[in-house]
Image (cartoon, grey):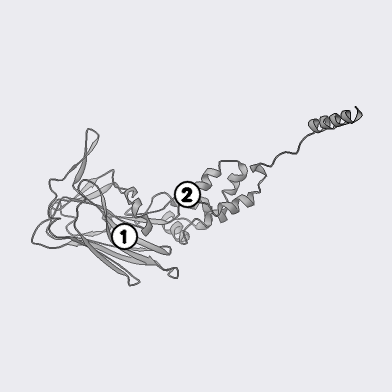
Amino acid sequence: MGAGSSSLALESEGGSGSSPSRPSLDDVPESCVSSIFMYMDPPEICKLARLNKTFHGASLADFVWETKLPSNYKFLVEKVLGQSPESLSKKEIYARLCRPNCFDNGTKQVWLDKSSGKICVAVSYKALRITGIDDRRYWNHVSSEESRFNTIAYLQQIWWFEVGGELEFEFPAGSYSLFFKLQLGKTSKKLGRRTCNVDRVHGWDIKPVRFQLSTSTGQQASSECYLHQQGNWGHYHAGDFVVDSTNTAPLKLRFSMMQIDCTHTKGGVCLDSVSICPSEFREKLKQF
């Protein structure tokens, strides 16, 4: 009886005593969370930052976001954002560079891929040398919601088709691909629906268009193909180039496309821009 009473008393004391609290996410040191964030992708960091104050504070650490920024981020902040890199937090720099940022009088855009932090660049047709672009018998400037620059060039008809351009830019180390964004046919909207008039498309199936690319480091590439993307935008590959990690100077690119066989005219093509992106991003080009 006494032993049983003693046992019940102990159980009663154990039941009424305060048990130690279980550890929670709030107990994890902010510095530890920041160290983990260094190995995570930016979208994952932003999701976890909503968990609590500790995770939110850890997500603001400069050393976390500096690992996500491209090696040339200081160049981008000064040239594109027009600010001093020291005046902004690393997270703010990343967020602002992920938006399309215009430079060179609005004729070029640069942005970071949100998931990887890799650089993409677009060059409007307005920054290119185009044979006959100022003659309305050949080319028209057309407003378009389908262009990131809101305007495209439409070729009615021409004998000598030649487009060329240059870009001097500081790219991080990696492999890049350059594309011309073209469409056969002129797009319009009728009753809110997208339509494309291809009546004036001609001459592109007779001879291929020649694409060329060269760099200030001596790299060269060329390709030929027939234009075939009627009614939809297509990205035509001009070539690839590699930026070495030891090359810290801005790289100069020269690129062109031409079809200069004057035995026939060609027309009915829309020219939007030139896109430069990491070579592994080819499948994402429809977003550009």
Question: Which residue is at 34% across, 48% downward?
Answer: 287
- The residue carrying mark 1 is 178
Which numbered mark, 1 or 2, is in the foreground of this view? 1
Q: Residue flagged by tag 1: what amino acid is it?
A: Leu
SS assignment at label 1: strand
Above/below status of 241 relative to 28? below
Q: Hey, which quadrant is residue 64 in on the image? A: bottom right
Q: From this viewpoint, is residue 170 visible?
A: no
Above/below status of 3 relative to 159? above
Q: Hey, which quadrant is residue 146 in on the image? A: top left
* Horizontal arrangement in the rendering, residue 28 relative to residue 9 (left or right): left
Q: CA distance from mark 1 to mark 2?
A: 25 Å
- The residue carrying mark 2 is 95
Q: Position of residue 185 (x, y in %)?
A: 18, 47
* Horizontal arrangement in the rendering, residue 224 relative to residue 173 (left or right): left
Question: Which residue is at 61% across, 50% downward?
Answer: 33
Image quadrant in which the N terminus is located: top right
Residue at the far left: name it. Answer: 263
SS assignment at label 2: helix
Which residue occupies the foreground of this view, 270 or 166?
A: 270
Which residue occupies the foreground of this view, 28 or 138?
A: 28
Which residue occupies the foreground of this view, 211 or 126?
A: 211
